[in-house]
Image: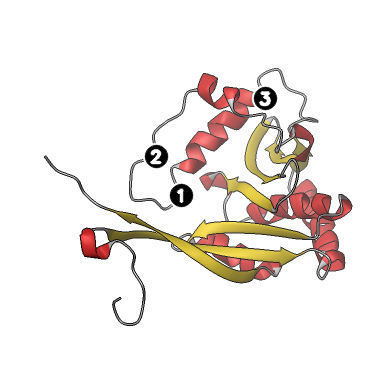
Amino acid sequence: MAGGVFRPGTHVGYTLDRTDKVWSLDLSKHQARLSADAAAARANAKQAGVEFTTVAAFQHPDKLRLVHALNERTRQDIPTTVPVVPESFESWVARSDPPGRPQDRWWLALDGHVPVAMSFLVFPQVRGNVWTGYTCSHPDYRGRGLARGIKLQTLAQAIELGVPFVRTDNDSENAAMLHINETLGYEPMPGFSTYQKRVSK
């Protein structure tokens, strides 16, 4: 106990590594605004030459390789303590179509045939909470509202599916995503922390 804050494991050498903030968005409460914002974001993107669509609707023979390239590039920007290890296309494909993430609920922003932003929710198969699985935009396209816009498509779709709440978590140093969550109306929940201990021979 340090300064009134419980820090588990510190008495045996663990130190605080990272802290994640957890949020919940009431889709019933914000339904009208979120749906309108999603439509406006889609229209604004179209005017700028960017199309919002799903992986299922994306007609390109190498679409998964293109999505994998975006995933690999943007994962490098997630705040982390340890290096982000590159994942091969084959490994990524093997886990890219789980039951909780159907391709018709996996949203992309396309500049021509190139994915430049994406977002998807993870749906429980039986019961539980719906969570945002990942949201990103390519560094060359940041500052244009695409990450927020593509995330809005997932939320508008969730509203249509009757989902009452969506949760998300982000590293406490991921200022851009934390700002998006705040503007969308997410409310903070208790978060979680990770601890590390260096083990030597």
Mark linked to residue 63: 3
Residue, disc 2: 84
| Residue 43 visible in this rendered orientation of the protein | no
**Label 3 sits on what residue type?**
Lys
The answer to the question of whether label 2 and label 1 lie on touching residues, with beta carbons closer than 8 A, is yes
Q: Which mark is residue 78?
A: 1
Answer left or right for 47 relative to 18: right
The residue lying at 46 percent from left, 49 percent from top is 78
Farthest residue toward the bottom?
3
Would you call the spot at circle 2 few (<14 residues within 10 Å), some (14-19), or many (20 or more)?
A: few
Left or right relative to 197: residue 26: right
For the residue pair 83 and 8, the one nearer the viewer reads as 8
Q: Residues within 10 Å of mark 1 (few under 14, many from 20)?
A: few
Dot 3, crowdedness within 10 Å: few (<14), some or many (≥20)? Answer: some
Residue type at mark 2: give it.
Answer: Val
Q: CA distance from mark 2 to mark 3?
A: 23 Å
Q: Quick one: label 2 or label 3, which is nearer the N terminus?
A: 3
Q: Name above or below for residue 88 compared with residue 110.
A: above
